[in-house]
Amino acid sequence: MTDPGFPAQHTTATMTTTETHVSPQIRYDPSYIRTVPGILKIVCIVLNLIGFICIEVSSFSYHSRGSFFNSVAMTGFWFTGIMLAFYLFHVLEKFYKLPWLHIELVFCAIWTLLYALAAGLAAAMGLEAYSAAAFFGFCAMVAYGYDAFLKYKAIQMGQIAQGTRQQSTIQQTVTA
């Protein structure tokens, strides 16, 4: 027997909507520098430059280990500098459909590994300038690794590089 107070059937529907709010104007916004990702980018740029200078002032700067370290440092310097400029001028927000967080995640993960290799090779050289460069290289490795971790967490939460993305869930129960 069925209970007369209990409905014979009911349906629950869940609807999730996602809203993305971006501004397509390119504009200068220095507030990004005060965020954790902005500070990390500046730290990475400085560490790349100092490591490069340490190798270049060495009398063995022509050595293959130094050349490899400098290639890693300068590529990281330019990519991170360009990305910092893109964030400061909201270029990423203008082109929000590109997977910027994925691009940065892959770059930061690769540069973490490359800096581990380059700094290890520089440290094994045993020269003072190379040891100093290795120290800054290991520091850059940690900074790029932490930046990769932040990008991974942002991707997991469904964020975009700049702008806002809001998800709202509505549940409706229909009783017959």
Image: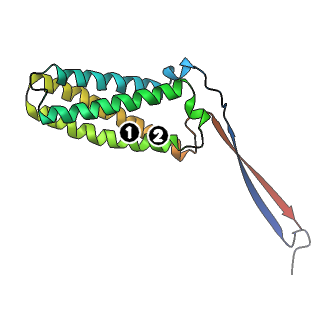
Q: Is residue 27 left or right of residue 49?
A: right
Residue 67 visible from this viewpoint = yes
Q: Quadrant of residue 79?
A: top left
Q: Position of residue 4 (x, y in %)?
A: 92, 72
Circle 2 residues within 10 Å: few <14, some 14–19, many ≥20: many
Foreground tag (1 vs 2): 1
When asked about the image quadrant of residue 8, the answer is bottom right
Q: Amino acid at mark 2?
A: Lys
Residue 108 numbered mark, or none: 1
- In the rendered structure, the answer to whether residue 96 lies left or right of residue 174 reads left
Badge 1 marks a residue whose secondary structure is helix
SS of the residue at dot 2?
helix
Residue under the image location 55 percent in, 24 percent down: 89
Tag 1: amino acid: Cys
C-beta proximity under 8 Å, tags 1 and 2: yes
Q: Where residue 131 sits in the image (x, y, percent)?
A: 14, 26
Residue at 30% x, 29% y: name it: 74
Report whether 74 appears left or right of 58: right
Tell me the quarter of the image containing the C terminus: bottom right
Give coordinates of residue 129: x percent, y percent.
14, 22
Foreground residue among 163 and 143: 163
Q: Nearer the viewer, residue 14 or 176?
A: 14
Calculate the distance from the C-alpha at mark 1 to the C-alpha at mark 2.
9 Å
> Which mark is drawn over residue 57?
none
Q: Is residue 136 above or below residue 109?
A: above
Q: Farthest residue toward the bottom?
A: 1
Name the residue beneath numbered marker 2: 151
In the image, taking residue 60 as reference, residue 175 lies left or right, namely: right
